[in-house]
């Protein structure tokens, strides 16, 4: 879905990370649904680190956005918990919205892109641990305890495990609970990351069952992603490490309570991993599928997880049924009916608009995976009227309308969503969605594309705006515009030249030594 490009799945689009820049000055603003029970630092992030160093306190950064559904879920279900609030007082918590001045540049410095992300830093700005959404809500406070007990940077700890260091229970927990998927990584490093996490699992104490399970599952995820293309080749075989990890995960799935506790990690396993499972033969694949489905079903009814995550487990189950079932076979009617029933029940139960946003997002993902675009359309359309950020769901509705063949409506919705969006970073993201839609669905409307492109690029005309999420979006827009022109055999070269010149008006305001200047200069630049 369009929203997936805006939330966590954008992480894998990053090709590289910039080195830290000079001190930044993102200020903390007042936001509509701010979790006010936590004593957020009233000042800049730079100032927070100064105070943290003086007081020798770790810094807890929350990176979110007003439109982000799972940010609202985190605020409503975790930040409101008394145990989390109490633990947060031992840190210097900073609430950094992605639209705050300079926020995207901080995202570049700390390699943050997906909303929501929580990161604990020591006073010297070394990362201790990072967390996202989608876990047992009681774990968040426990993780803060772990961060206080051991301030060794998480990467250093992982490298120690690779070297064969025996891990304590606390060290193992910190590695297992770290949201590695929120750390942007080049695809060429996936296998290395998988090997490192597998080594950490092997170094965990025998009684750390859940931690070993989570680490092995994460290792399998990265290893499968690294081998995905190779697994498509004739007579392909997974690596010995990946096959061994499949066996480990199968054993986890055979222990119901352990599997449910590891559901957050298990739900990350995707097509690449299931492809490797299929190569083991029908008996292994069928047994694995049945155990995985049972675990996801159990997790989808477990009160440790919020409703949106429970729906996410149902979606993960449906993916496994597709990937490990007979090729092109429809999903069992009982599973389809059960998914619809869970969606209807969840939406009827939860009426808080901030909590509902994550719930609706999860429901739309299930319905689109089921091919029920009419059902998804009705839910998205109904949610627009009650949503705190209706432009978010207009982008979803536009995607569904496009799949239903209603291109004019889809483009109109993307236009509305862009013009209703708020905040510099958000407006460029929604503007780039609008541009992508125009290039796909109205490629001959050249004047509209030229006008929209000029307006959307104008959202970048300001300090510290071409970083992180915006930079990824700008590079993608560059590719799409070039492909559009190539398809027309160069007929739109004048439009591309005009957009390049508009970008140059922005580039001249950025110092040459600034990392953003390179991305700015490269946009639609003609080959030498």
Image (cartoon, rainbow, N blue to C red):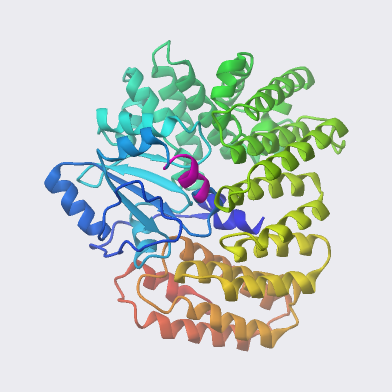
- The N terminus, quarter of image: bottom right
Left or right? Give the position of 404 relative to 455.
right
List x then y, in percent, for residue 442.
Answer: 75, 77
Q: Position of residue 379 (x, y in %)?
A: 74, 54
Q: Is residue 63 left or right of residue 188?
A: left
The answer to which image quadrant residue 242 occupies is top right
Whether 170 is among the magenta residues is: no
For this orientation, the residue located farthest to the top is 206
| Viewer-proximal residue among 430 and 144 | 144
Give how far across and how far down residue 121 sits, in percent: 28, 43
Above/below status of 120 relative to 100 = above
**487 lies left or right of 477:** right
Whether residue 528 is visible to the viewer of this picture, yes or no, is: no
Pick out the residue farthest to the left: 54
Name the residue: 47% across, 73% down: 522
The stretch of residues the image draws in magenta is 72-79
**In which quarter of the view is residue 78 placed?**
top left
Q: Main secondary structure of the magenta part?
A: helix
Please tell me whether residue 76 belongs to the stretch shown in magenta.
Answer: yes
* Up/down of 125 relative to 428, above or below: above
Q: Is residue 163 left or right of residue 244?
A: left
Query: What residue is shown at x 21% (from left), y 52% (from top)?
Result: 49
Between 106 and 247, the residue placed more toward the observer is 106
């Amino acid at each position: 879905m369009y929203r997936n490009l805006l939330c966590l799945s954008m992480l894998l689009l990053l090709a590289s990370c910039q080195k830290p820049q000079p001190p930044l000055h993102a200020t903390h603003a007042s936001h509509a649904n701010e979790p006010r029970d936590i004593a957020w630092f009233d000042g800049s992030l730079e100032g927070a680190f100064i105070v943290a160093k003086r007081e020798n306190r770790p810094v807890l950064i929350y990176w979110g956005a007003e439109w982000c559904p799972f940010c609202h879920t985190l605020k409503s279900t975790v930040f409101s918990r008394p145990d989390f609030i109490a633990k947060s007082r031992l840190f210097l918590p900073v609430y950094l919205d992605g639209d705050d001045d300079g926020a995207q540049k901080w995202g570049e410095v700390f390699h943050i892109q997906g909303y929501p992300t929580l990161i604990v830093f020591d006073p010297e700005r070394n990362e201790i641990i990072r967390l996202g959404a989608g876990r047992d809500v009681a774990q968040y406070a426990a993780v803060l305890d772990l961060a206080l007990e051991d301030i060794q940077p998480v990467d250093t700890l992982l490298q120690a495990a690779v070297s064969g260091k025996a891990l304590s229970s606390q060290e193992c927990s910190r590695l297992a609970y770290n949201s590695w998927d929120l750390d942007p990584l080049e695809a060429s490093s996936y296998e290395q990351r998988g090997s490192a996490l597998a080594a950490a699992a092997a170094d965990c104490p025998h009684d750390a069952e859940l931690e070993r399970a989570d680490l092995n599952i994460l290792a399998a995820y990265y290893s499968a992603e690294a081998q995905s293309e190779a697994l498509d080749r004739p007579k392909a075989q997974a690596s010995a490490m990946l096959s061994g990890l499949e066996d480990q995960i199968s054993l986890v799935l055979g222990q119901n309570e352990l599997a449910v506790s590891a559901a957050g990690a298990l739900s990350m396993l995707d097509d690449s991993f299931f492809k490797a499972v299929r190569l083991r033969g029908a008996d292994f694949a069928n047994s694995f599928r049945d155990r995985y489905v049972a675990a996801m079903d159990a997790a989808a009814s477990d009160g440790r997880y919020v409703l949106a995550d429970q729906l996410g487990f149902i979606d993960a189950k449906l993916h496994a049924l597709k990937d490990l079932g007979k090729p092109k076979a429809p999903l069992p009617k009982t599973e389809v009916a059960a998914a619809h029933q869970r969606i209807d029940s969840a939406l009827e139960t939860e009426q808080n608009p901030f909590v509902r946003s994550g719930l609706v997002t999860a429901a739309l993902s299930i319905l689109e995976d089921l091919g029920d675009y009419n059902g998804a359309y009705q839910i998205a359309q109904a949610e627009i009227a009650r949503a705190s950020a209706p432009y978010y769901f207009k982008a979803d509705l536009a995607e569904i309308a496009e799949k239903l063949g209603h291109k004019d409506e889809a483009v109109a919705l993307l236009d509305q969503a862009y013009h209703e969006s708020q905040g510099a970073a958000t407006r460029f993201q929604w503007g780039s969605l609008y541009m992508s839609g125009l290039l796909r669905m109205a490629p001959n409307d050249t004047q509209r594309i030229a006008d929209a492109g000029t307006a959307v690029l104008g959202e970048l005309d300001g300090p510290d705006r071409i970083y992180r999420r915006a930079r990824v979006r700008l590079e993608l827009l560059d590719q799409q515009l070039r492909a559009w022109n190539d398809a027309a055999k160069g007929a739109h070269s004048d439009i591309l030249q005009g957009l390049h010149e508009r970008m140059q008006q922005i580039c001249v305001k950025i110092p040459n030594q600034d990392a953003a200047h390179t991305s700015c200069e490269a946009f639609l630049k003609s080959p030498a």
